[in-house]
Amino acid sequence: MEKLKPLKRFGQNYLVDKNTIQKIVNQFDPKPDDTIVEIGPGQGALTSLLSKTVKDYLAIEIDKRVIDDLKINFPTVEFINQDFLEINLQDLASEKKLRVIGNIPYNITSPILFKLIEERDFVNDAILMVQYEVAKRIVGKPRTKDYGILSVLTNYFADTELCFKIPPTVFYPKPNVDSAIVSFKFGKKISNEIDEKLFVKVVKAAFGNRRKTLKNSLSNNSFGDLNFDSLAFDFTRRAEELTIDQFIELTKIIQSLDR
C-alpha cells in the first residue's frame, strides 16, 4: 500500500513501528474465535497481525482512500466505510460480545468512550490507543488533578488499566504528544439502584467547575432547585474529593427526590 498523507480532519497518525504494533497485539491477546471490531485500521498496521489469528474480523474506516486497498490486502476482513460513532454495535455482535481495538482519533476519544459505555451490553472489552494525558485522566484517582468526568464514568462502567506509554516516534506523522494503550473490561456489575443517565448527569454537573463546591457546581447546572441544606450529604466538598461510591450515594439522594 502506498504511503498516503494522513488527513488532519480524521485525526490520523499512522502506527508504523513493528515492535509497538506487536506489543499492542500481545496486550490484546486475540483468540481465533473472537469477534473483533477495529476502529480506524488506516493502512492496516494492526489488521495485518490480528487478521492472521481471527476469522470474525470487522474494521470500521471512515477514509474512503484506503478502503479498496485494505479489501485487496486483507480479503478475510469485512471493512465498513463509515464513521464508528454512527455504527450500531448491536448489529455487529452476533452470538458473541465484541472485542474492540483501535488507534483512535484523539479529537473524538471521549465520544468513542461514551459510545462504548452506552452500548457495553454488546462489548466484552476494548484496547485503545489514546493521548497519554487522557489515559492518565481515565485512571485518575480522587484528590488528584487527573481525576474527573472520564475517571468516574469509565471506572464506574468498566475496569480500566493504563497498559503502557508510547512515544511519538512510532507514528507517521509524529504527533506532538505521547500516547498510551488503555484497556477497558466491560461486564462489570453496576448499581441497579440508580438511574444510569442521572448518574452521568450528576457526575458531569459536579465537575462543571472543579474549583467550586458541589453546591455551586450543581446549582449552576440542572439541579439549581435543590434545597441542598436539607439533604444528608456534604455539598461543601468539591467533585474531585468524591469517590465513585460517593457519587453513587449522591445520585441515590437526588433520585429519591422524584424530580
Image (cartoon, rainbow, N blue to C red):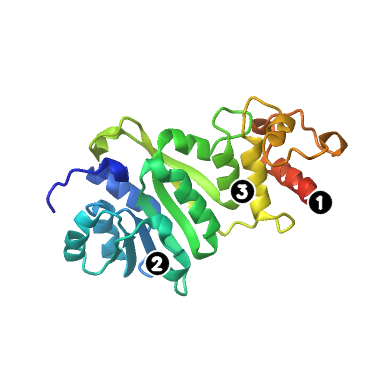
Q: Which mark is residue 156?
A: 3
- Does residue 75 sit above or below 104 in this rendering? below
How would you rate the neighbour count of disc 2 (Cα within 10 Å): few for under 14, some for 14-19, many for 20 or more?
some
**Residue 72 occupies quadrant:** bottom left
In x, y percent, where is residue 186?
54, 56
Amino acid at dot 2: Asp
The residue singled out by tag 1 in the image is: 256
Outermost residue on the bottom side: it is 95
Secondary element type, mark 1: helix
Q: Earlier in the sequence, mark 3 or mark 1?
A: 3
Circle 2 residue? 34
- Check whether the beta carbons of the residues at disc 3 and disc 1 lie within 8 A of each other: no
Rendered location of residue 140, percent (x, y): 55, 35
Q: CA distance from mark 3 to mark 1?
A: 20 Å
Q: Residues within 10 Å of mark 3 (few under 14, many from 20)?
A: many
Residue 127 rendering spot, x and y as whole percentages: 42, 51
